[in-house]
Amino acid sequence: MPTPPELEWQDRIDHILDNLPAATWTAYGELGRAVGRGPRQVARYLSTEGTRNAYRVLRSNGRVSDGFHWNHPEHKTAREVLSEEGIHFDRSGRADPHRRLDADDLIELMRDYVPYLCERKRGRGQPVYGLVSGSARFRPAGCGPACGS
């Protein structure tokens, strides 16, 4: 049986942000350290992919990036949503540093992220690789989103 490929850094970011608890935040640099990339590369990925929970990634000083844009269904800002989740901001717009997760915390969120080989095949009989986490999204019997099930 073939070995699953190395996880792409983008997949690791997606998994971390999918599992980032409400009322917590991290910085671009911390997320970059957790996945082996620089903060600018992380910011570029988040700005182009519409990744879930990207609003929880702030600048290292705890401020929402000036360049952060999203299409919130209720037209709320990232700061408004974070405040509703329980993150307090000081007068200069910095998020509570006690709610910040560092690279070690983010790596811990990936602890249960294991590669698997999906048993279904697509196209020309090539195996489809995917990922399963220990979260509620777990797909038993080796099948997951990669096979469309």
Image: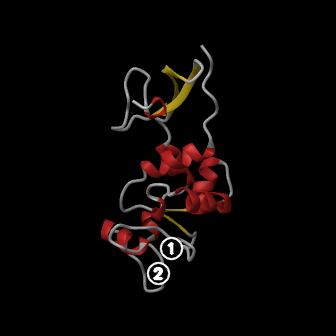
Q: What residue lies at 40% left-to-right and 34% top-to-bottom? A: 134
Image: 40 above or below 62: above
| Nearest to N terminus: mark 2 or mark 1 | 1
Q: Which residue is mark 1?
A: 64
State which quarter of the image contains the C terminus.
Answer: top left
Give the residue at the far top of this rendering: 1
Q: Is residue 72 left or right of residue 6?
A: left
Q: Are marks 2 and 1 in contact (CB under 8 Å)?
A: yes
Percent of width and height locating residue 43: 61, 62
Of labels 2 and 1, the one closer to you = 1
Residue designated by label 2: 93
Residue type, numbered disc 1 = Val
Q: Amino acid at mark 2?
A: Gly
The residue at the far front in this view is 123
The residue shown at (47%, 68%) is: 70
Q: Residue at x 47, y 29 (%)?
A: 147
